[in-house]
Amino acid sequence: MDILITGSVAYDYLMTFPGMFKDHLLPERLERVSLSFLVDSMSRQRGGIAPNIAYTMALLGERPRVMATVGEDFGDYRSWLEIHGIDTSLMKVVDGEFTASFFATTDQGSAQIASFYPGAMAYSDTQSIKNLMSIPDLVVVSPSAPEAMKKFPAECRELNIKYLYDPSQQVLRLEGQELARDMEGAYLLFCNDYEYDLISNKTGWNLQQILKHVKVVVITRGRDGAHLYTDGQECFIPTVPEKEIIDPTGVGDAFRGGFLAGFAHGWDWTLCGEIGSLAAVYCLERRGPQSQEYTLQEFVSRFRRHFDDKGKLDVLIA
């Protein structure tokens, strides 16, 4: 299956705070908050939602395409993605710009405070699905510049292409009518439970109303697993026990990548979610969104300690 992923491409600057943010927040003074956290570690990682999703898909044997705008500092990153099986031919360098940057500090309770500099991502709406030489089977619309997030769903609807709508971090920037319009034509909707509440509040739609417009809704709930809703059915996807928790950055992207790898094989929704659940844990156990490594045999073996795939994953290790 030809899956095209749109969204941010960024360098992640990841820091850890040896305490709990909540211990330093004064509820009665939040409107004048002024804090500086002394971190005890920092690393620079390759990140961005689109390549994070693509990286997990590639680990599971797929070769997704990423369409995004990047900066002049992208050369080494491009080589890394190509080596790991990701098609970067649609990743366009914007002259005079840096690749987007994500700055995140995580505390001991896995709470995270982050900032994002768009850089070259601000030009992502200069690209067009209409200009592609081959039409993809599915387009992933994940967070990038707001104008691009409006443009790509519209092009998918015009071209009758299925798309996965994943507004996540950009829910705050999008108006209710914009969210409703782009859910209207979506095949899948992905969000976490907090983002779902924001979407529901902004659109005035409850889950049943959303499902009148979207084929499949997947709501991730962190430690509490995920729920999948479609055709009047609800499926719970449990988490896989982690060996250790290192860094939550990119865990949701890894879940999406695992889910899409299953979707590319035409597997049922439950199995897709379970593959996503294990892919997410592999990410959680490493620092950075593209640091996890495993062979297909290792993945399938660990999967079968927690789930029953009825032999379907044999195709991955054949």
Image (tube, rainbow, N blue to C red):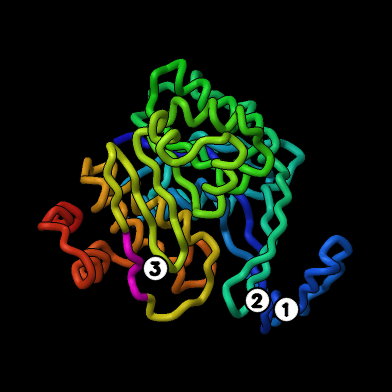
27 up-or-down from 259: above or below: below
> Distance from label 1 to label 3 (Cα)?
25 Å
Main secondary structure type of the part rendered in magenta = loop
**Real-space Cα distance between discs 2 and 3?**
19 Å
Of residues 236 and 81, the one drawn nearer to the viewer in this rendering: 236
Give the amino acid at mark 1: Val
**229 sits left or right of 142 in the view:** left
Label 2 amino acid? Thr
Q: Residue at x 54, y 25 (%)?
A: 181
Where is residue 249? Give x, y as percent: 55, 64
Q: Which residue is mark 3?
A: 282
Q: Which residue sits furthest left?
A: 311
Measured as percent of width and height from the top left, residue 293 is found at 38, 67
Residue positioned 30% across, 49% down in the render: 234
At 20% from the left edge and 69% from the top edge, which residue is drawn? Answer: 301
Q: Which mark sits nearer the N-terminus, 1 or 3?
A: 1
Residue 247 visible, this angle: yes
> What residue is shown with label 1?
39
**Circle 3 residues within 10 Å: few <14, some 14–19, many ≥20:** many
Displayed quadrant of residue 47: bottom right
> In the displayed structure, does residue 281 sit left or right of residue 165?
left
Whole-percent x, y for residue 201 in the image: 60, 42
Q: For the residue labelled by badge 2, is the local secondary structure a helix, a strand or a loop?
A: strand
In the rendered image, the quadrant that contains the C terminus is: bottom left
As shown in the figure, which amino acid type bears the numbered disc 3? Tyr
Counting every numbered tag in the picture gives: 3
Residue to which mark 2 is pinned: 16
